[in-house]
Structures are given as structure tokens and as C-alpha cells.
Amino acid sequence: MTQNQISKSITQIAPGVRRLVAPNPGIMTGPGTNTYLFGEKQVAVLDPGPLIREHVQAIQLAVAGSIRWIVVTHTHPDHSPAAKALAAATGAMLVGQPPPFEGLQDQSFFPEQVLNDCDRLATDEFTLRAVHTPGHASNHLCYLHEELNWLFTGDHIMNGSTVVIDPPDGNMKQYLASLRRLKELGLQRLAPGHGDVIDDPDAVVDFIIEHRLQREAKLIDALNAGGVATAEELLVRVYDDVDPQLHRVAIRSLLAHLIKLQEEGRANDTQDGWTLAQ
């Protein structure tokens, strides 16, 4: 890949912030995983994506200065596996939270600096503040660019679709709480891990919450109508508006809704299936 090709693939989305899209398009990743570059002299790379050699090379060629930090939002396979190779090539510090042992996680990611909620990375050019947003993943961090007041959302919010909540590491109750927290930040824009920048963050957050609660209400209606039902039986009723090709993914979010209702004392998991709590 030449420098000219790299230049054409980079999008300047704000002063001091550029985006490269990893070549991993698909049903779950949209056009591909967004890799963000912050700063010019001391650069932070956010979400280097899956381990694709040409993308790792593109990141290196896009940086005129030095890469100081390689930061990840979470350790799903489309966001963090390239971090280790990029760090080995550049000497940059790996930053984020370690992978949980549950679910499909990138166990190669070993952060040298663990970030917790409200921790900051700062240079003369930018400040990134970690915002812990569990739900899609227990170790999920969004990053607030304090100068722009933009939130880089990873998979907490995507442009074009809702995200999968996959138990046991994914948790629907935590996800909704993390969404509500975003409204306290007074954000200007959202820069997601997949898709284009999103305007009107509060309206988008409200829409996602309402969509999830409508799905939950539909689930409660299905439980009420069916007595005892398995997740597979509930799936065809609750996700009847979703392409059947996506049902193998949708059933994970359905299970997350059922577990949320169980945690709230509103549903029971019996040996024969799920039922509303009396």
C-alpha cells in the first residue's frame, strides 16, 4: 500500500482527528471497523481493529509523528487484535481494560495501562476521558474527546443498526443504564466504531432506549400469551420483523432481555422454558 493510497483512505472528521476504516465489512461490522487517529505529534490510535496486515501498515503510514498510545474500546475480535502487532512495530503503549474470560474475546490484548472510568490520556493536542459503558461488553470504554465534546463510542452505539448484547458478558440491564448515562454528558456528536459520525446524540440515545424497551414489551406479551416458552419459540414472535438470517444473532439479545427480566423478578427460567413471574 502506497502513501498516496493511504492518503485517499483517510478521512479528516474533525481538527486533529482522522479515521481509517479496516477492510472487514460484513453484516456485523457494516463498512468495517473504524480506527481513529488523534493528534499529529504524539498520536493515540483508537481501535486498530482485527489483525489485517495491510490495515496495520496503513495506520503506521498515516502517522507522521510517533504513536504514543494504542487504545481500545473493548476486546471483541473486530476491535483489538491488531493492537499487539502495532505495538510491537511502534513501541506504543497498549491502553484499555483487559479481556474478560467470558464470551468471544481477544485474549492477546494485555494493556500496559489499565483505564477506569474518568481516567484521562492527555497531550498538548487532545484529552481523552474514559467513560465505562458496560453492556455490550463488561470491559467496554467509550472515550470523550474533551476539546470537541465528541464521544467515541466503539460498539456502545453503532451507526445503522443496534448492537448485539451477548450474555454472559453482555448485559442488557447494564447496557440501558450505560445509555442513560450518556445523556448526562451534554455531547455534541458521536463517533461510532462502525459507520459515520452521528449528530444529535440525545435523540439517538432516546431512540435506542425506546427501541430496546419496545422489544422488551413485545417479549413480555409473547411470554404472557404463550405461558412457558423456550428462547427459540419466543424468538420467532419477538423478532418477527428481523431477517431470519440474523436470528442466530438476535437470539443472544433476546436472551439478554430474558435475563434482565429475571434479574428484576419479572421472569423465571424453568426446566421447560421461560415464563412470566407471578
Image: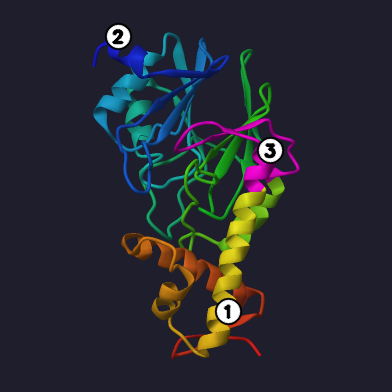
Is residue 61 visible in the rendered image? The answer is no
Counting from the top left corner in percent of width and height, residue 252 is at 43, 65
Residue at mark 1: 221
Instruction: Tell me the quadrant of the picture where the N terminus can be found.
Output: top left
Left or right side of 178 for 109: left
Q: Which residues are magenta?
A: 182-205
- Cα gap from disc 2 to disc 3, whole angstroms: 38 Å
Name the residue rendered at 32%, 26% in the picture.
56
Helix, strand or loop at disc 1?
Answer: helix
Q: Let me know if residue 199 is in the magenta part.
A: yes
Counting from the top left corner in percent of width and height, residue 184 is at 76, 43
Q: Amino acid at mark 3?
A: Cys
Counting from the top left corner in percent of width and height, residue 263 is at 62, 74
Residue at mark 3: 118
Q: Establish if 87 lies above or below 248.
A: above
Name the residue rendered at 58%, 79% in the picture.
221
Q: Establish if 208 lies above or below 30.
A: below
- Cα gap from disc 1 to disc 2, whole angstroms: 56 Å
Left or right side of 11 for 172: right
Counting from the top left corner in percent of width and height, residue 151 is at 61, 34
Q: Amino acid at mark 1?
A: Asp
Residue at mark 2: 4
| Mark 1 vs 2, N-terminal side | 2
| Mark 2 vs 3, N-terminal side | 2
